[in-house]
Image (spheres, rainbow, N blue to C red):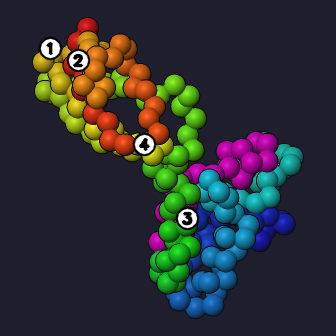
Amino acid sequence: MQYGHFDDKGAQSWSVLSGFTGGTDRGRKAMDAVEKYLTTDKGIKLSWPGYTGFDRTKGGVTTYPPGAKENGDIFLHPNPWAIIAETMLGDGDRAFSYYSRINPAAKNDSIDEYEGLQLDPCIPAGWDGFTVERKCRGALYHISVRNPNGTSKGIASMTVDGKPHVGSLIPWFESGIHTVEAIRGK
């Protein structure tokens, strides 16, 4: 702790990763502090608590509101460091918990796309097409995009489960496996 603030920016994780604390109690204590002070349901914060006013001795970090940017926001890069540090200390449950908090695929059931899945990829014109599987809200979508006209963007036609579908917005399904076929064009 420094000036009453708990500042990770990777320090606790790197103390383990570097071998400085190794598997000792000091390494566990550092990572327990990450869990206690920096862990949120969306990932690990950079610092806690946020600075509440400008301080010349600390610089720009104190110009942001608490919880914004470097003043206590969640940045992705310290999260994998904490995951690796926890595996080095033998806590697979905590490592997986941290991973799940930042894994976009783990958020599929809680995303707020209200109308459906938008299919509007931009690909190199020379590609013949591509296929992808997308699991979303309990349904599995097998999506195939053909590009016979050599275009980078635009959907000329689309079928959903074999039926013609107007536009590029794939409707939501609560369950099941659904086939989407799209043809590129202008």
Q: Of helix, strand and loop, which one carries label 4? A: loop
- The alpha-carbon separation of the residues under discs 4 and 2 comes to 27 Å
- Left or right: 161, with 148 as reference point: right
| Residue at 48% from the left image edge and 43% from the top image edge | 137
Q: Which residue lies under the disc numbered 3?
A: 98
Q: Which residue lies under the disc numbered 1?
A: 149
Residue 175 circle label: 4
Observer-nearest of 85 and 167: 167
Give the class, few, some or many, for how many residues have Cα within 10 Å of label 3's Cα (few <14, many ≥20).
many
Residue 182 circle label: none
Q: Is residue 151 visible?
A: yes
User: Could you say which quadrant of the image residue 142 lies in?
Assistant: top left
Whole-percent x and y of residue 180? 28, 29
| Residue at 46% from the left image edge and 31% from the top image edge | 172
Q: Which residue lies under the disc numbered 2?
A: 184
Is the residue under label 4 in contact with that under label 1 (CB below 8 Å)?
no
Observer-nearest of 161 and 37: 161
| Residue at 79% from the left image edge and 47% from the top image edge | 66
Q: Main secondary structure of the magenta part?
A: loop
Q: Of helix, strand and loop, which one carries label 3? A: helix
Query: Sequence-wise, which precedes: disc 4 or disc 2?
Result: 4
- The alpha-carbon separation of the residues under discs 2 and 1 comes to 7 Å
Amino acid on which the number 4 mark rests in the picture: Ser
